[in-house]
Amino acid sequence: MNILFDGASYKELLKEFQDFEADSCNFWRGVAKRISVPYEWPIRIDHANGPIYVGGHDFMMERIE
């Protein structure tokens, strides 16, 4: 697929992508800080069952309600 962007469209998409990346980094940094692991470690959250997996290990966190 070939897509052509003009300068204004590219700048708009770039800004949106940068905002998305900043929000994503802030979210994952918060998760890493909350479970006290380095940000660089791979983190996966199982939304269906609840556990958080970090580098192949699971952390059973208490639910805060």
Image: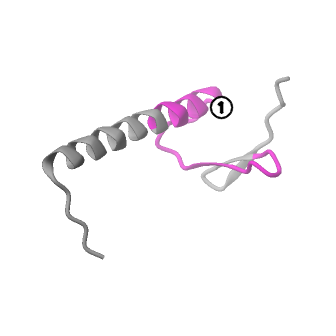
Residue 20 screen position, x and y as percent = 42, 39
Give the residue type at disc 1.
Answer: Ile
Residue sitting nearer the eye, 39 or 21: 21
Residue at mark 1: 35
What's the residue at 79%, 35% (across, down)?
61
What's the residue at 16%, 53% (across, down)?
6
The picture quadrant where one finds residue 15 is: top left
Q: Is residue 31 above or below residue 56?
A: above
Residue 48 screen position, x and y as percent = 80, 52
Q: How is the image coloured?
A: one colour
What's the residue at 85%, 23% (across, down)?
65
Residue 33 screen position, x and y as percent = 57, 27
**47 inside magenta stretch:** yes
Circle 1 sits in a helix, a strand or a loop, which is it?
A: loop
Residue sitting nearer the eye, 7 or 31: 7
**22 inside magenta stretch:** no
